[in-house]
Structure formats: C-alpha cells, structure tokens
Image (cartoon, rainbow, N blue to C red):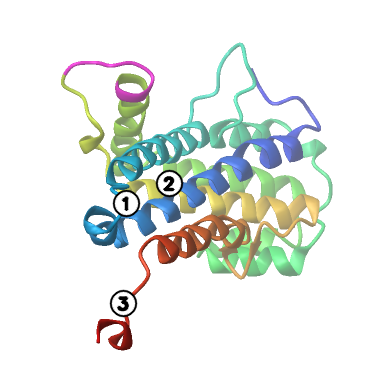
Amino acid sequence: MTIPQGDLKRVLDEGLASDLFRFDRARRLLSVIADRSSEIDTGPGNFGTFFVAIHAALTTEAVMAIARVFDVPDKKYPTRCIRAVLNYLRVQAENLPPISQPYQLRKQLEAINAPSELVQLAASDTKQFAINLSGHFQTVLDQLQWQENLRRLKDVRDKVLAHSEHGVSLKGLEWDSLDEFAQLGKDLIGVLGWAYFSTAWTLDGEFVLSNDAAMSSRALHRLLDKLYPKTTQGDAS
C-alpha cells in the first residue's frame, strides 16, 4: 500500500525520524556500556547482570529501528519506510509543494555529495527533482553490497528477533552496516525536510535529533560516575 497523498510529513515525523532517533539513542547508550564495561564488571554493587540485560534490550531496539526504516512496503499496510517514501516521490511528484528552502536544500545536497545535476534541479524543477532524488537513493539501495547487508538485516529481524530460527544469530550483522543504514536515512530525511517542509532535520549534514539522542547517554555517564566514583590520590592516601 502506498503512502496516502499529503501524509509524507507524518510518515517522516512518526516513522523515519522517530526510528533514526531511537537507533541513535540505543547506539550511544550501548557505546557507554561498552566503554565502561570494566567498571561495571569489577565495581561494587554487582550490577553487571543488570547491564547485560540492558545491553540486550538496547541491541534489539537499535536493530528493529533500522529494520523498520529499511522495511519493504506492504501491499496491505502503509509501511513507514524509505522505499515507501521513494515510491511516494515518484508517484506524487506532480503534487508535491514547491521547494521551500532552496539554499538550505542545496547545502544539504552538497553535504551528502549528491550528484551535481540533483543540486541544480533543486532550484529549477520541483517535479524532476523529486523523481531524480528518488532515483538517486534507489540506486544506492540497489547496489550489490547494500542488498547483501539488507538481506542480513532482514534475516536477523525475522529469524532472531521476531522468531528463533536455528543457525541464525546477531553475529551475522555488523554495527558498521547499521551505522551506514542510519546515515542514508538521515541523508534522505534531511533533504526532504528542507525541500518541502522547512524542517531542520539536518544542519550542515548533521542529524539534529542526534543531539537529543545523546542526552540519555550523558545521563548514563553521570549515573555510572555516582555508582563508581573515581578514586583520587587524596582518597587513596
């Protein structure tokens, strides 16, 4: 089922932007746990098993968030995923509003190293820009390496997280691939925000919601500082 006409902003807000934020938040929290694993494992309080459980939950959160972003459009339900958005751009190109922020749009396109012809269309042809933008991102998704990594992502989601299939594990999925997936989603939503909605999902190529996502990891650092206060030289004496 395609995205209903006029619902693109809602799909981006409640679908892609939300899931990319959830991925960033989980990824940053996992990074804190990994960086401070020695303190957690050997420090007072025996909280290691608690953080093992948190680590597992955050891993599921991160993988499922990216899996939703790169889901396959469903024939019955309007799945909020990148492929559905790209299809929307092709089908509804004539009905999209005029480009609202051409200067910021060109900056975003240049920041993601978009083709020069796409940058030029940003100021001249709204319909063709939407069609070419969709084609550009679709070309990336159709690359062999992307297809292989997306297959692994789908296998992990379907055969490890949603079901429990023998012989499949999270080890088949690399975090570098998840980060690459997330970056592509951020690139697309950043372009669309400036193109049609005057929405700053990105500034100078950086995903704005990443700053909000970092708040939880900074809070976790503060919590761990309280649980495992650093011993100063004065205390040791």
Going by the picture, which residue comes out furthest to the left? 167
Residue 206, percent from left and from top: 57, 65
* Residue stretch rendered in magenta on the structure: 160-166
Q: Residues within 10 Å of mark 2 (few under 14, many from 20)?
A: many
Residue 165 among magenta residues? yes
Q: Which mark is residue 231?
A: 3
Labels 2 and 3 touching (C-beta < 8 A): no
Nearer the observer, 43 or 6: 43
Q: Nearer the viewer, mark 2 or mark 3?
A: 3
Q: Residues within 10 Å of mark 1 (few under 14, many from 20)?
A: few
Mark 1 vs 2, N-terminal side: 1
* Above or below: residue 29 compared with residue 154: below
Tag 2 secondary structure: helix
Nearer the observer, 189 or 100: 189
Q: Amino acid at mark 3?
A: Thr
Labels 1 and 2 touching (C-beta < 8 A): no
Question: In the picture, residue 224 is in which quadrant?
Answer: bottom left
Q: Nearer the viewer, mark 1 or mark 2?
A: 1
How far apart in space, not on screen, are marks 1 and 3 (Cα)? 16 Å
Q: Amino acid at mark 1?
A: Gly
Q: Which residue is mark 1?
A: 45
Q: Which mark is residue 181?
A: 2
Going by the picture, which residue comes out furthest to the front? 237
**What residue is drawn where x is 51% and y is 63%?**
218
Residue 227 among magenta residues? no
